[in-house]
Amino acid sequence: MAAFGSLGAALAQDGATPLEGIEVIGTSPLGGDGLDVDKVPANVTSLSSSDLSGGTQLSVTEAIARKTPSVSLSDVQGNPYFKDLYFRGFVASPLNGTPQGIAVYQNGVRQNEAFGDTVNFDLIPEIAIDRADIWTNNPVFGLNALGGALNLKMKNGFTYQGLETEFMAGSFGKFSGKAQWGQQFGNWATYLALEGERDGGWRDYSKSNVKRVYGDVGYKGDDAEIHLNFSLADTNLGVVGPTPRELLERGGRDAVYTGPQTTDNKAGQINLTGDFDLGSNWSLQTNAYYRQMKQKHVDGNDTDVRPCEDNPALLCLEADDIIDPATGTNPDDDDPRLIVRDKNGNAVGTPDGFAERPGSIERSQTNSHTVGGTAQATNTGELFGKTNHFIVGVSYDHGWTDFKGDSELGIIPDNLQVIGTGIKYHTTFPGGILPTDVSTRNDYLGLYLSDTLDITDRLSATIGGRLNYAHITLKDHSPFFNVDANGNPVGAGIDGSHNFTRFNPMAGLTYKITPEMTAYAGYSEANRAPTPLELGCADPSNPCQLEGFLVSDPPLKQVVTRTGEIGLRGHTAPGFGGLLNWKVGAYLAYNSNDILTIPSPLTGRGYFKNAGDTQRAGIELSADYQTDTWAIYANYAYIDATFRKNVTLGSPNNPQADGAGEINVKKGDHLPAIPAHQAKIGVAYRITPAFTVGGDMIYNSSQYFVGDESNQNKKLPGYVVFNANASWQVTDQIRVFGMVDNIFNNKYATYGTFYDNDDIDFLELNGSRTVTPARPRGAYLGIGYKFSANAAPALVTKD
């Protein structure tokens, strides 16, 4: 059975007690190869469309985080549409520079973007999601599935019929409108979903606008089902980022540090899928797609540019935090390569007001295209007289990206929103500030197979694996290059070509101890190749403006994760008075050559590094109980995420860093940003057949600040949040719903790191900690209208 659903939807329709049944799950990104979940040697969580909607949470990522063990959200940027999703200590993030560890698919199309493997959840049409499967322990999902995969299956006109609209408004200028329509016409069906949202943002300068469209046209015959679907999205996000704790105490929790910070995303995707019955127990699943994503990012910051010591009429990059790769020492302040120059190469004088309040605006533009497809054959015939489920497939993805970035001198006013001077600037010192114009190419090829054989009526065995091949090229088109002390070019930009190959095996067993209880054990391996962003920013002597610039490409090794897990799962028969589903499991995931983001002494910059081995080990407990009037769920997860080798990392703003801005991480130190303990409880009660109330609780324990990998500082405190909701089915067509998030207005944060308190002198800050505060209490009210089936618009058809 699926996990606990939304209010009203989680409770059985028409007051009927939920029935026991066999849950079938697709074991690959394409789906279409349904397998009894009790034969899967891993812990898989499935959420239906009712779990993901229904007016009990504000987004799909929140629904997943509230109902799935080992999933938590980290709000790095202070925007509800721009959150990191952590699963078992691995992350899917929209933020360039975050090492990604979760593969995300929408109808078989990989949503990890070509440039940095980022996942922009704001671009996924939420109302159109029919089912979400959160997978562990399966290399079939390809690159980035280190911790697991999120596989989204979308609605179509065969699975959804009718016409519904929904409107909601609430705190912080929140307005949203959604509509979906589906209808079947014989062998043909169509589906269309529209979404529009505006969020005023509870912090200064953090408003957002979101528009999404999804459509599907499908044909279903006796031997084939074919769909052509598309999605479009246009979002504008105010991402305000962490704020020093002192500033929050002075100006309130809605205060922000520096800006502007905005991200504009536009994406379009078209996908042709097919599922064909070939006879003799064989079927074929296919897809072919094209995807484009455009992103513009603006980030206002302080800068290390100051009037030159020997000539204050000109500007120079401060030399204190820069290492000359040729000598291993700081350059002299009068090094001519430190002089700030405009786009024509001329030395820049000091603009009025800049010397007192120096700032910079970093801009980047990403334009990515991806085209590819998958072909998969499935056989469900017997093998040696035993029930068998076999899949074999091949996938190919080709991506190309154009990335540009530059810096503009600015002045920081009292409101900390940097005002640009119109002067684009650069230096020529290695590791300095350079504009960027780079193109990248990705070629990802995957060959995979999986076979599940019923050895006995109770025992099933699964074996399989995937061969991944990645070819990545980078070409630098920038007009500026690093130069030596004599002005001669150094190196050849970030031009490079990289190849990565690996076969990842998997194996597992499931055993039905009783008809209601199954034990499982599995082992798998997964890998991810370094992204073009990481390969182009891997030199500590040439750090990048994160969310931005590429300057060099020393080789990085691919990350390999080896995962083992065991567990039990079961359910009770309906005679228990309801249906109880439960799971208990344990896992260990060991990462070799993990890639981490390392901050540079140069303000706002960093680089990527293979930082030794890391490990995530944990336990997961979950249960949900449903009757005709009650629906209850509870889950708990323990995640022990640690370094497994001693390593020295840069963390210049950590109060415990040495004179070189480094910290010594010991084997056994914990990874930051991952709470060790997570607990979630939810309940829904149907007071009358039409009126349902409910609520949930989320607990996350304390976590180490990002940049405190050596675990020497006080942790970011844990938190408990309570939410409530209600739903009233006024008529068969009209439903009114409401929710209150963070009922007790708990003041907490989900993300913390360190900063240089000398960056902006006039603020006179003394601390070192900066956090992203979470949203205060918010109340929201909505109404949904469901047209009767015969009220849905009809299309004119010809005989």
Image (spheres, rainbow, N blue to C red):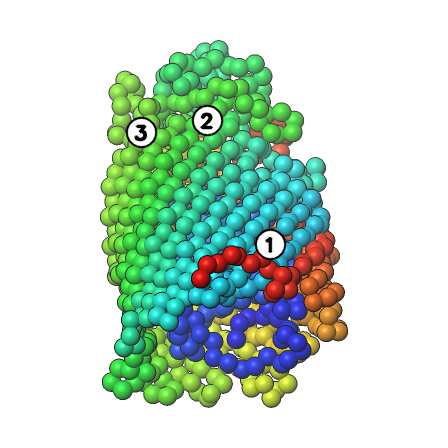
Is tag 3's residue or tag 1's residue first in the polypeptide sequence? 1
User: What's the distance in space between the residues labelled 2 and 1, CA to CA?
Assistant: 42 Å
**Residue 166 in view (yes/no):** yes
Counting from the top left corner in percent of width and height, residue 229 is at 44, 54
The three-letter code of the residue at mark 1 reads Ala
The three-letter code of the residue at mark 3 reads His
Residue 487 vs residue 355: left or right? left
Residue 701 vs residue 159: left or right? right
**Residue that label 3 marks:** 477
Which residue is located at x 63 percent, y 50 percent?
Answer: 177
**Residue 504 in view (yes/no):** no
Which residue is located at x 47 percent, y 87 percent?
Answer: 515
Secondary structure at badge 2 equals strand
User: What's the distance in space between the residues labelled 2 and 3, CA to CA?
Assistant: 17 Å
Viewer-nearest residue: 8 or 659: 8
**Residue that label 1 marks:** 179
Viewer-nearest residue: 395 or 302: 395
Counting from the top left corner in percent of width and height, residue 136 is at 42, 66
Q: Which mark is residue 407?
A: 2
Which numbered disc, 2 or 3, marks the residue closer to the eye?
A: 3
